[in-house]
């Protein structure tokens, strides 16, 4: 499940760190398997964009048909199209105003929740676009753990700078996890359930706009996902004559993760519902956010040809 992504859970501080797997290239150098990772993430686009049931329905005719349909839905999103043109232009903007958040962030968050944590998607956000092909705004991910009857709700940010991503995620905590926003968003989710004809009393009770606010909070896991440039990856190595990640790298990563969590907690210390809401931090360091996103755009564009 998600073989091209390494996962380091730090359960005691509700933090998960991920990175693209490393391997040896043809010259014996240690490098990340970015192309294989992109393939693995893109394989999830039909289910991400259409939802599992719709993807299965379309796949009955042809698996390729579901893939094309999912890719088309993703590509037609206004923000994705604009960012695609920007990233693949011969003179891209240095401002990098696109994809600080966006559907690639949402796609990767979906992939991590489903493949690494085993939490299936509840609602496909991409499938419910408005009439201008813009994604309906709200939570970036809505997943569900049937065994515990808990929602996993996510917000995502793509930044070159980790601190900027943490600052924006902390801002989302205040903006999105309050009484008014919950009522609005859960009304939308409830309406989409009706559109899909989903019958599940436990979920319906949980997302019912009239359910007590405290009852929602204690049954929700919030995932704040940040993808950012980080030099920590330059420290990656293997133990000699093994395929095991070196303890030196693991020790450095642990220190970095703990400091990052402390930084995030300091930015959210005034949040009034911290004692009720389970707040998880998903960290995804990369060598170059710009180059990774560009690679994903090239792949998405190629699939439209």
Image: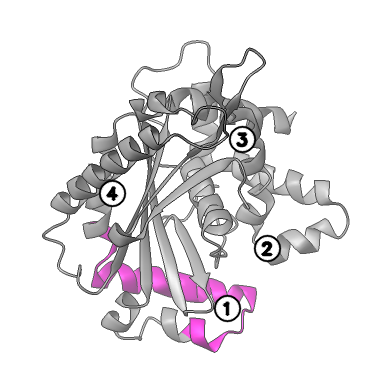
Alpha carbons under labels 2 and 1: distance apart: 17 Å
What residue is disc 4 on? 169
Task: State whether residue 134 appears in this view.
Answer: no
Which one is earlier in the sequence, the residue at label 2 or at label 4? 2
**Residue holding disc 1:** 194
Magenta span covers which residues?
A: 175-204
Alpha carbon distance from label 4 to label 3: 25 Å
Residue 223 coordinates in the image, percent (x, y): 38, 57
Q: Which percent across, then down, holds residue 137?
A: 41, 55
Which residue carries the number 3 mark?
38
Q: Residues within 10 Å of mark 4 (few under 14, many from 20)?
A: many
Question: Residue sitting at 28 percent across and 49 percent down?
Answer: 169
- Image location (x, y in percent) of residue 255: 26, 41
- Which comes sooner in the sequence, label 1 or label 3? 3
For the residue labelled by badge 4, is the local secondary structure a helix, a strand or a loop? Answer: helix
Q: Is residue 129 above or below residue 31?
A: below
Query: In the depicted view, which residue is nearer to us: 271 or 18?
Result: 18
Sequence order check: which comes first, mark 4 or mark 1? 4
Marks 3 and 2, the one that precedes in the sequence: 3
Q: What is the CA distance from the residue labelled 3 to the residue labelled 2?
A: 20 Å
Q: Which residue lies most toward the front here?
A: 241
**Is the Cβ of the residue at disc 4 closer than 8 Å to that at disc 3?**
no
Q: Is residue 163 magenta?
A: no
- Count of labels in the image: 4
Q: Main secondary structure of the magenta part?
A: helix
At numbered mark 2, what does the secondary structure look like: helix, strand or loop? Answer: helix
């Amino acid at each position: 499940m998600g073989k091209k992504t390494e996962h380091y859970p730090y359960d005691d501080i509700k933090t998960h760190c991920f990175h693209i797997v490393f391997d040896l290239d043809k010259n014996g150098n240690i490098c990340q398997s970015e192309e294989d990772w992109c393939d693995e993430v893109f394989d999830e686009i039909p289910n991400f964009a259409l939802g599992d049931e719709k993807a299965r329905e379309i796949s009955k005719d042809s698996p390729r048909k579901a893939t094309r349909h999912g890719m088309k839905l993703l590509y037609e999103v206004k923000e994705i199209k604009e960012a695609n043109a920007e990233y693949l232009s011969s003179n891209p903007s240095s401002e990098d105003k696109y994809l600080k958040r966006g559907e690639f962030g949402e796609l990767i968050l979906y992939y991590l929740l489903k493949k690494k944590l085993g939490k299936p998607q509840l609602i496909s956000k991409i499938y419910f676009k408005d009439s201008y092909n813009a994604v309906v705004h709200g939570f970036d991910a809505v997943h569900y753990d049937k065994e515990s009857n808990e929602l996993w709700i996510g917000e995502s940010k793509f930044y070159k700078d980790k601190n900027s991503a943490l600052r924006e995620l902390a801002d989302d905590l205040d903006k999105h996890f309050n009484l008014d926003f919950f009522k609005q968003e859960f009304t939308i989710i409830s309406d989409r359930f009706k559109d899909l004809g989903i019958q599940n009393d436990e979920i319906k009770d949980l997302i019912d706009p009239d359910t007590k606010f405290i009852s929602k909070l204690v049954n929700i896991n919030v995932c704040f996902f940040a993808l950012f440039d980080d030099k920590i990856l330059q420290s990656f190595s293997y133990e000699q004559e093994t395929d095991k990640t070196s303890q030196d790298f693991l020790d450095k990563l642990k220190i970095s993760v703990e400091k990052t969590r402390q930084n995030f907690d300091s930015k959210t210390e005034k949040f009034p519902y911290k004692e009720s809401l389970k707040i998880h931090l998903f960290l995804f360091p990369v060598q170059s956010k710009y180059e990774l996103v560009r690679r994903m755009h090239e792949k998405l564009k190629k699939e439209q040809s």
